[in-house]
Image (cartoon, grey):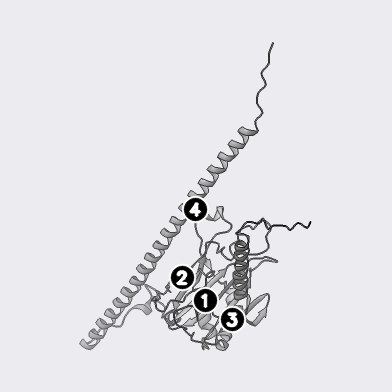
Amino acid sequence: MQLTSRDTSPPLTGLRRTLCLLTIMCLTSACSLLSSGKVLYDQQDSQIGIQSDPTVHRGPAPTDNNHPSQLTTEDIRVLLGSLMVSGWSGTLVGILEQPRPVPVFTDMELTRIAAPIAQAFQQAGPTERVFFSLPKSQTTYSEERTTGALFLRGRYLHIVLTDHSAFTGTDTAGGDLKDLRDTKGMKLWVAAPATAATVPDAEEPRWAHFEKVHLSVNAKEVIALRNRPATPPQGGLSSIPPPVTNSASAGTRSEGGAGNSTNQADELRLQVRELTSSNLDLRDRLNDQHKQMQALQDQLLKLQQDLDSARSKNKPARKSTSQ
């Protein structure tokens, strides 16, 4: 008599396997998306190149980038030199610390990568973007890197930052793979006098799932700030205006004063807008930190209760002594 084995596995086993396979495929495709591309510059462990832009086909209609672009090396230095980033290292310490903005690229890095990035923009196609991957500066060895991508679309330069070497990632307890969801609490900023652009919804790129740290600037406006004349020193002889001798000169002077007042008013509006945006961002960050602190406190309280319960169960009963 031959006995046939019956499948006693739960009915959801096949579904679980399917979900696991789909998860692995998604992670694999995300990793390949971030790592694929054509490297155009590879020196001192720094890579600059071009890759497919996932935001081109994510919207309701395909939208091409303004590539190839004729940005100069100095244009790249000005655009990237205005970028700042804040974040934290690890998890618990990062929640307790205040964000400390640092430049996305050091002066040494800008000197090294500005020309290769300009050349990459000249070679990139309408459906491609420029990517960068830089090691941590002034260190012998570090696993932390600064990685991200850039692309021009319409009036805007869009920047996405996927990692930065100034902040240490979450401890994976021996795991070798970086969690794509771990953005280290990073946030991109723009240093004054440049300001971040408010992109209309119709022009906002549809970012990939793991590209949540991004920023946009009006490229022409930021580059134009490079040519703004410096304010003359106060009290110097050169700052004294010539005497007014006729009504025409008086009219010219009044027009100049009106122009200066307009420029000052525009600068004040930009500063107020920047401060308002910063305050709103800080308020949102504080709210997120409060929520995370509350969640940690709840976890600690539960762990304490579980520990007390385990101790009470394992405590031996006191034996009664009889005379």
Q: Is residue 175 left or right of residue 214?
A: right
Image quarter (top left, top right, bottom left or bottom right) of the N terminus: bottom right
Upstream in the sequence, badge 2 or badge 3?
Answer: 3
- Residue sitting at the far left: 247
Q: In terms of secondary structure, where does tag 2 sit?
A: loop
In the rendered image, the vertical position of residue 156 relative to residue 320, given as above or below: below
Mark found first going from the N terminus, 1 or 2: 1
Residue at figure coordinates x 60%, y 59% from the top left: 12
Mark in the foreground, 4 or 2: 4
C-alpha separation, residue under disc 4 versus residue under disc 2: 28 Å
Rendered location of residue 57, percent (x, y): 50, 81
Q: Nearer the viewer, residue 97 or 323?
A: 323
| Mark positioned earlier in the residue sequence (4 or 1) | 1
Q: Which residue is mark 2?
A: 191
How far across and down, in percent of the image, does residue 276 sit? 37, 65
Q: Select label 4 or label 1 by which is in front.
A: 4
- Amino acid on which the number 4 mark rests in the picture: Gln
Estimate the spatial distance between the alpha carbons at disc 4 and disc 3, rounded to whole Å: 36 Å
Closer-to-camera residue (207/262): 207
Closest to the camera, between mark 3 and mark 1, is 3
**Residue annotated with mark 3:** 51
Looking at the rendering, which quadrant does residue 244 occupy?
bottom left
Q: Name the residue carrying label 4.
A: 292
